[in-house]
Amino acid sequence: MKKKDLENLWFLFKAIYRQEKKTFYIGVGNAVLQAVNPYIFVVLLGMIVDAAFDGMEFKRILLMIGTAMGAKLILEILQSRLNESYNKKMENYPKEFASRDLNLKALTMDYEYLEDANARDIRFRSFQKSFYGIGGWLTVGIHDMLNAGLSIIISVCIAAPMLIAGHNEGNSFFGSAWSSVLILVLLGIFAFISCKINVGGTRKAMQKFFDSSAAYNKKMYYLDLLSGVEPQKDIRIMNFENIVHNDVENLFGMIYENEKQQNIIYVHRNIFRNIILGLSSLFIYLFAGLRAYAGAITIGNVVTYASSMERFIASINSLATHIGHLKSAAMYAEDYREFIELGKRKYEGTIPVEKRRDNKFSVEFVNVSFKYPGSDTYALKNINLKFVIGERMAIVGKNGSGKTTFIKLLCRLYDVTEGCIKVNGIDIRKYDYKDYCALFAVVFQDFQIFAFPVGENVAAGSKVDEALVIDAMNKAGLRERLENLESGLSTCVGKDYDEEGVAFSGGEKQKLAIARAVYKDASFVIMDEPTAALDPEAEAEVFEGFDKMVGKKTAIYISHRLASCRFCEDILVFDDGKVVQHGSHDVLEKQEGLYRQLWNAQAQYYA
């Protein structure tokens, strides 16, 4: 195994041990008992057979049998208790380990990596490996390898005296040391072949799955697509059935073929492994019988020796299988490590954001340029702005002009490629990230309303201040809708997880998103196309209640509908990644330029 593989496995193991020490130690105890338990009868059975051949009293033989059974019973009780505890721990592994690492990372990693297909594939591979996830898989592997390793050691300790017993010149070949050397060489050859078959076959099969992870990822996408209510509207009305069906059929056919090839690899591996095991057992019993015939060992030794060596070979096979799994696990451990270390914020600030009662903050963009990861084109270029905000601002421009990108940089979803952004004279990268994010309440055009209760959707948490939620919903124009909900704030949005849930229209969901922004009570309220899903009457309602909703806070609009700009003291006009105009509606309407063109094009709708 390569040094890099060992380093990745060690990284994963440390994460497991840090979080699941109790599970690890329970697993070690369980593995030790599982390794020791079978040899109780193996040793005592041989002793009992020899005692019977030597003419020992029946009472003493019964005492030996009783001792063996008592020891076996005690070990079985201990093992069953440990095994029960171990299995319960492993059942919760996806929840207790994966969710704390992979899920938490997905929720806190740099935003840019969420749009990275490679990052999604890495996360998928880390998550999907077996029921237990990659962490549980490695834990089970360590448990089984420890079990196999201890079994090998015990079997060698039991069989070794019998291999060297009776070595003298007077005995036949099978009573000599050369016979022991011969059987050890043969068993060594069998063990080596078995290891190669197990390690190579297991790794080859896992590599098949690894190579097709993107297909499995796409499979999950289609499962969500086919079971979703919203996507089905477009699929049915716009006749996407054929293309979706054909793509799904091709995808599942490719996955089936891949799994078929994996199964063929496993079948071939198991056939060759069973042949090796059979030949090994044949030689072990033949050798043991011939050594007993030569007088080198007793009849009881034959039983103990042969059983121990059989377990030795089986444990070698088991160890080889798990080494193969371990090599495969190293690939997933590499993904796990890469995902956990992915997107570490380049600038981890520590400065707390100044708390201002007046909510006035000076914002300065200093020669800011930005390119999205993987792109050679600037989404924003040489933005230089300085303004004190505590009022209402509009950001307008054509599609793709850089409006939303500007807000993403201000909210620090992305860090600038060049230049810097300052708030109150300090580079925003120097602020504590969570403290800085607390300044903003944003309603994006592609906002998300979750299948949670209404109150939790607005409060963005399980702790709901009902009075504040109701006030925020009233300000967002949802008073009447709330009054008609039988379960009030406890009503779930949609029926995804609750049959008593209620379906909300697109406009109502957008108002819920606006209520969420109001509830947060942040210094900056930013709305990206806040009325895009609303009809004109509802749009007017939002505009009329806007002053009331925002109060003295800073409000920033991103809008295509320039009617919203009349409510704003300051307007930024974007075009091709640059701010081409800056001023109030009255000033910009009189100037020749893009704003006037856009206003005149839409003026007929505002008459």
Image (cartoon, rainbow, N blue to C red):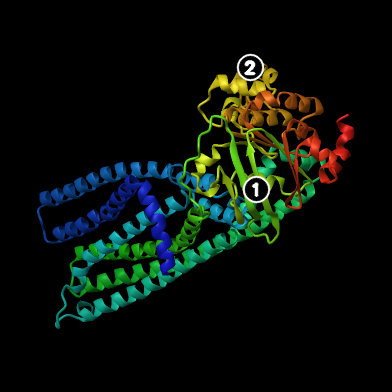
Between disc 2 and disc 1, whose residue precedes?
A: 1
Left or right? Give the position of 160 relative to 395.
left
Q: Furthest-bottom residue in view?
A: 169
Say if 307 sits above or below 130 in the image: below
Residue that mark 2 sits on: 486
Instruction: Identify the residue at image location x=70%, y=17%.
Output: 480
Instruction: Identify the residue at image location x=76%, y=37%.
Output: 584
Say if 32 sits above or below 275 in the image: above
Most foreground residue, 417 or 4: 417
SS label for mark 1: helix
Residue that mark 1 sits on: 221
The quadrant in which the C terminus is found is: top right
Q: Position of residue 303 (x, y in %)?
A: 24, 62
Say if 318 sits above or below 222 in the image: below
SS label for mark 2: loop
Number of callouts in the render?
2
Say if 512 sits above or below 599 in the image: above
Q: Residues within 10 Å of mark 1 (few under 14, many from 20)?
A: few
Would residue 121 be seen by someone viewing this image from the given angle? yes
Most foreground residue, 38 or 491: 491
Question: The disc labelled 2 sits on which kind of residue?
Answer: Glu
Q: Position of residue 183 (x, y in %)?
A: 29, 75
Question: The disc labelled 1 sits on which kind of residue?
Answer: Tyr
